[in-house]
Image (tube, grey):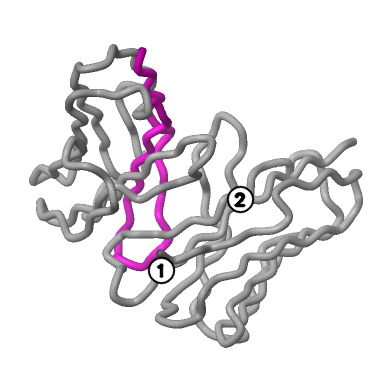
Amino acid sequence: KAGVTQTPRYLIKTRGQQVTLSCSPISGHRSVSWYQQTPGQGLQFLFEYFSETQRNKGNFPGRFSGRQFSNSRSEMNVSTLELGDSALYLCASTPGTLNEQFFGPGTRLTVL
Amino acid sequence: ILNVEQSPQSLHVQEGDSTNFTCSFPSSNFYALHWYRWETAKSPEALFVMTLNGDEKKKGRISATLNTKEGYSYLYIKGSQPEDSATYLCALFYSGTSYGKLTFGQGTILTVHP
């Protein structure tokens, strides 16, 4: 079975721009979670989608949004980028809500 | 805010040494604890999922225990090898905040010297 894939792997943007990141879960996994990893904060939960519905959201500003498609692929969008948004963004899929999560390789976003 | 604390932050050991790390967490509303291993340039990979007080899990040279009443879990590595070098993360699911939300500790960075 193919693992979780994320595109792009690296991205450089400037302040004020917006960005869209993509995540394709393992086939059959309907739950996709997104996390942000920064050096000082560790892994922080952004949101979770299941069957195209956002079921849970972390403490991030409204500039962070996401969606899920009928094939379970998910995208997250960050608008009006700030320097502090520079981070590694990981997505993870799981077959069940409380099961182990399978992580993708991440997208490294740099905001200049 | 749910605080998951891991100690030590980093650890350097020699090949062949046995080592252990601690994950401490608020025990109220506990649902499940996960241990992940995150090697450099790779994705985090699950080691164990633990739900019951007194749970003990083992995978090769790595084992883990769980005490939900006092709010801690230990991860043990017996006879560390250089390939065990990684960041070890514990993460919690809490009832009432589940639906895909793992709360992670900051991790323990393990370096095993040949």
Query: As rendered, which of A9 and B69 lies closer to the eye?
Result: B69
**Considering only vertical position in the picture, is B49 above or below A52?**
below
Left/right placement of residue B56 relative to residue A59 reads: right
Residue B87: x %, y % from top left? 64, 45
Q: Does residue A29 appear in this view? A: no
The numbered dot on residue B107 is: 2
Q: Which residues are magenta?
A: A86-112
Chain ID of residue with mark 2: B
Q: Does residue B25 appear in this view? A: yes
Residue A89: x %, y % from top left? 37, 35
Q: CB of mark 1 within 8 Å of CB of mark 2?
A: no
User: Residue, x 50% and y 44% (percent of image)?
Assistant: A42
Going from N to C along the chain, the mark reached first, 1 or 2, is 1
Left/right placement of residue A48 relative to residue B80 reads: left
User: Residue, x 40% and y 48% (percent of image)?
Assistant: A44
A105 within the magenta span: yes
The numbered dot on residue B93 is: 1
User: Residue, x 35% and y 47% (percent of image)?
Assistant: A92
Left/right placement of residue A95 relative to residue A66 reads: right
The numbered dot on residue A37 is: none
